[in-house]
Image (tube, helix red, strand yellow):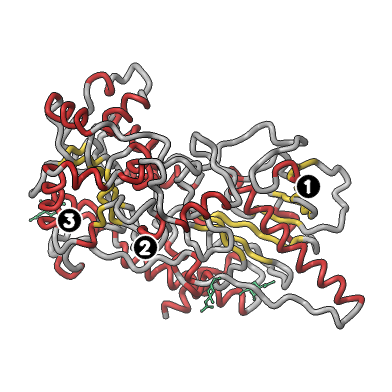
Amino acid sequence: MGRYIYLIFLLSLAPVTFDLAVLAELQYSDKHPYSEDNNINDVHHMYSDYGSNYHTYTDKNGDMDIPIILWWTSASLYPHHDRQGTVIQCEDVQCYSSANRNQLSDKRTRGIMFYGTDFDPTDLPLPGASQHEWALFHEESPLNNFILNHNIFLKLINHTATFRRESDYPITTQNIYHPDFLTIKQPMPLTVKNEKRKKNNLAPVLYVQSHCEVPSDRDRYIEELMKHIDVDSYGSCLHNKDLPDHLVDPASNFEKDEFLELIQSYKFHLAFENAICKDYMTEKLMRPLHIGSVPIYRGSPNAKDWMPDDKSIILVDDFESPKELADYIKYLDTHDEAYEKYLEYKKPGGVKNKMLIEHLANRKWHVNIDGSMEYFRGFECHICQKLNERYTLEKAHGLDPTVELLPPKTANVSHLGCPQPYTSLGHPEDIKNTSDLWRKMEWVEMYWEGFDQARAVRNMLLNHETKPSTYKKYLRKIRG
Ligand SMILES: *[C@@H]1O[C@H](CO)[C@@H](O)[C@H](O)[C@H]1NC(C)=O
Ligand SMILES: *[C@@H]1O[C@H](CO)[C@@H](O)[C@H](O)[C@H]1NC(C)=O
Ligand SMILES: *[C@@H]1O[C@H](CO)[C@@H](O)[C@H](O)[C@H]1NC(C)=O
């Protein structure tokens, strides 16, 4: 739940008007991917990859000679009922999964699970042991824990589940909720869009964002863009339009369908990620594709690799300036045929990207319709299989030294690592205004602080440090 806490922290920092638009945006973009399931104890729990070959049960004796996976961070994300130890059966292998830290010293503990946001260098699972394999899952961009960007840190990790395709258990398409998600909904017909536009006096472009201070510096660019083309901004960032009365009524719950209808009538969506990382694509991109509005996208530099065809999004980085981008949007806005090319993928057979089709058909985890997903347990099973593989060979090697052991396996910067934050327009040195929000957030400083943190953690492990509390000493030493 670290993300929620962080959000509240951010909201408390900025003078945000906590109106319904904010609530909407929170639901819209920062929903937790895992919703607690209370019926998961002792029942067969189905999910795509393992199907009926996955189940969990409580073993009262707890004395089987199988690997233990210890969930070190994020107690609230622990996906089983019994925190003291649940047997997970993943196809033909078993592990204990536990959130009981006393088991760190158990010889069978071989997997240690971290949720990226909550990885805390002052709270390491020490003393370490050679059989410990660290596993990291993180579906977000690392804007709340910059240690995750650095190779030095990622090389301390053995297994990953992140948005990067290079990750061991990639969840790159986590916001494509099911294989037909991008095509199942037809766009609102252009004639209807045009009618609604006139009737309700809408701009061609929509922006809904309430998380304004982010490493990607998105609002600087959008503010400039707004000088050249009309944008309706309903969120608290660059707010210039209130939601219609029937959506703002605080007494009634936020009406999802009506909100969708509103945003569907826009021809274009500004879809700017909070950080610029390869393969980091959120619902900001996937939702406009789902509802049939054209995303104007700034985020993963290789986003096109995952798009349904080569003309479904407009990439901000293809344009020299916000003005040039605005001119192109205006052109599409007045040339229906050119605009509709961007929605061709909605037609039967319109999805041309073979990699995307195959990936969606074969991915090992599934996402529930409401956006919650099963990759937590899927990744845990992945780890369980890897741990068993190594453990079985070790035992066999003990009996017969000619049996070969597996080579070490570690992650690296390609499993997550986002580059140093940069301004969305101009250069960081050009920002003379000391009240500038991006400058005030000190993203660059935080990035390099993450580098120092990574070095301190690495040095602790190299020194076989046994006390987590020594972290500060290591950090001081690095900073000289
Ligand atoms: C796990 O990663 C650590 C740090 O890089 C490495 O020393 C160790 O050999 C790895 N363990 C396995 C089993 O590959
Ligand atoms: C980093 O990890 C990727 C994917 O696991 C691997 O293919 C690549 O060789 C690694 N790079 C380095 C420099 O070790
Ligand atoms: C400096 O930035 C702040 C915050 O964005 C803004 O309110 C203020 O008008 C800016 N000052 C100048 C001189 O541009």
| Measured Cα–Cα span from mark 1 to mark 2 | 40 Å
CB of mark 3 near ligand 3 (< 8 Å): yes
213 vs 21: above or below: below
Farthest bottom residue in view: 402
| x, y percent for residue 68 | 76, 56
Alpha carbon of mark 2 to alpha carbon of mark 3: how far? Answer: 33 Å
Badge 1: how crowded within 10 Å, few (<14), some, or many (20+)? many
Q: Quadrant of residue 65?
A: bottom right
Which amino acid, mark 2? Answer: Asn
Q: Is residue 55 left or right of residue 287?
A: right
Mark 2 or mark 3, which is nearer to you? 2
Classify mark 1 as within 8 Å of ligand 1 or not, answering yes or no.
no
Whether residue 117 is situated above or below residue 194 in the rendered picture? below
Asked if the residues shown at circle 1 and circle 2 are in contact, with their CB atoms under 8 angstroms apart, the answer is no
Name the residue rendered at 53%, 58% in the picture: 170
Is 138 displayed left or right of 89 in the figure? left
Q: CA distance from mark 1 to mark 3?
A: 54 Å
Residue 412 picture location, percent across and down: 52, 72
Element type at mark 3? loop
Of badges 1 and 3, the one in the foreground is: 1
| Amino acid type, residue under disc 3 in the picture | Ser
Q: What kind of residue is marked 1?
A: Val
* Mark 2 C-beta closer than 8 Å to ligand 2: no
Residue 435 — which label? 3
Furthest toward the front, the residue is 349
Residue located beneath label 1 in the image: 87
Which label sits on residue 302?
2
Q: Mark 2: few, some, or many residues within 10 Å (few <14, many ≥20)? A: few
Secondary structure at numbered mark 1: strand
